[in-house]
Image: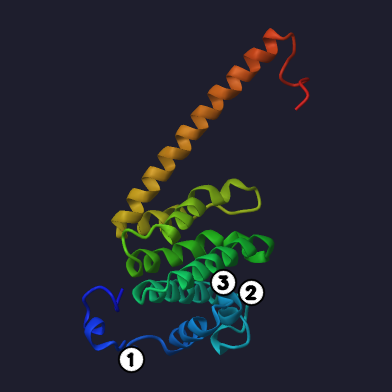
Amino acid sequence: TACTSGFKETTTSRVNLCDEDPLLVKIMLEFLYTQRCDLSTTFLGDEVGDYDDGDDKDCKMRALNDIIALYALGDKYGIPLLCQHASHDFEKTICDLRDTPLRQSIPDILLGCIPQVYTSTPDSDRTLKDFLVKEMIHGHDSSSSAMPDAKALLETMENNAQFRKDMTVGLLEKEKAKEKAKVNETELINALAYAGLDWDSSPM
């Protein structure tokens, strides 16, 4: 962090916030005093004029990117609890979209967040990255969710080697899980047959 990792802030006991977004700094300082913040309300409510339309896809994407920026700010200045709040509100905002008309736009919104997550958070920090990859791979398993646009997804993967690697690993793990499920289903069918039952009539 800036105050413990050999930066000039370590010796001067001062933190220069001039280059940071004023709104994010305000939220960070309020959090340090109150230990409370509702980022989804802050970024999607009436406090910020740019985010007046809570049902607009671009509005949601901008708000989520600001939450990512606040997460990165918390990491930069060594405030892990702020990172936890930002991560929670990031995931909550995405999950809440599933019950709105924007649920079909979730893959596009996620794709719009990926560049900032992978460039503004440390390589070793997997919190937001793992959530995004999981949502990209499994989020459309529900019939109410849309598939990600293949061209946009491939372009994002081409432009980000780490995201490409994470998606590859995640897709392989999903295929392994499907194969394991098939094996388990076959074993269950065989067991039912041995007991004189069939799959359709078994009490499940």
Q: Which residue is mark 1?
A: 18
Element class at badge 3 = helix
Disc 1 residue crowd, few under 14, some 14–19, many 20+, Cα 10 Å: few
Q: Name the image quarter holding the C terminus.
A: top right
Q: Earlier in the sequence, mark 1 or mark 3?
A: 1
Q: Quadrant of residue 96?
A: bottom right
Q: Residue at image x 34%, y 52%?
A: 164
Disc 2 residue crowd, few under 14, some 14–19, many 20+, Cα 10 Å: some
Q: Which residue is mark 3?
A: 57
Residue 135, image x and y in percent? 51, 54
Q: Amino acid at mark 3?
A: Lys
Front tag of 1 and 2: 1
146 over 85 or under it: above or below: above
CA distance for labels 2 and 3: 6 Å
Q: Residue at image x 57%, y 23%?
A: 184
Residue 158, image x and y in percent? 31, 56
Q: Which mark is residue 55?
A: 2
99 over 85 or under it: above or below: above
CA distance for labels 1 and 3: 30 Å
Element class at badge 1 = loop
Q: Amino acid at mark 2?
A: Asp
CA distance for labels 1 and 2: 33 Å
Q: Residue at image x 69%, y 14%?
A: 192
Q: Label 2 near label 1: C-beta < 8 Å? A: no
